Amino acid sequence: MKHLAAYLLLGLGGNTSPSASDIKGVLESVGIEADNERLEKLISELEGKDINELISEGSSKLASVPSGGAGGAAAGGAAAGGGGAAEAPKEEEKKEEEAEESDEDMGFGLFD
């Protein structure tokens, strides 16, 4: 992923065909060592392709992937049952608290 991110950054900067050394330079500038095998694979797969076209193709593919929506149906079913509607928020709050606690146990933050 880091190799692709560097490739895209170079593309945004105006380099329409970044080389492996260009990508290594970007990664090394932020203290990341490039993986030559993955880098060469990325370069070979993207060779001769337009980044903007690839992004638009990927976006259209992602648009067809189902996401979300299932939670609303389950809550609606509980509400139809009568007393279940009052219990649903409590369970949801408990799950959120557990998730927050587990993040703290890891010992590091996202931006540390």
Image (cartoon, rainbow, N blue to C red):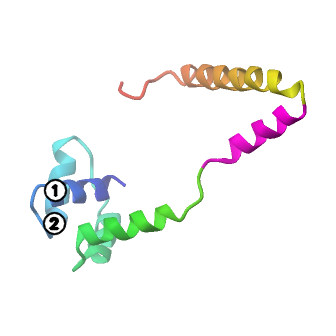
Residue 12 shows which numbered tag?
A: 1
Magenta stretch, residue numbers? 68-81
Residue in view at x 84 percent, y 34 percent: 78
The majority secondary structure of the magenta stretch comes to: helix
Q: Earlier in the sequence, mark 1 or mark 2?
A: 1
Instruction: Indicate whether 107 appears above or below 55.
Output: above
Q: Quadrant of the C terminus?
A: top left
How many labels sit on residues? 2
| Percent x, y of residue 104 | 55, 19
| Percent x, y of residue 74 | 77, 41
Element at badge 2? loop
Residue 20 shows which numbered tag?
A: none
| Percent x, y of residue 38 | 35, 65
Q: Quadrant of the N terminus?
A: bottom left
Residue in view at x 23 percent, y 54 percent: 6
Residue 18 shows which numbered tag?
A: 2
Instruction: Indicate whether 4 appears above or below 60.
Output: above
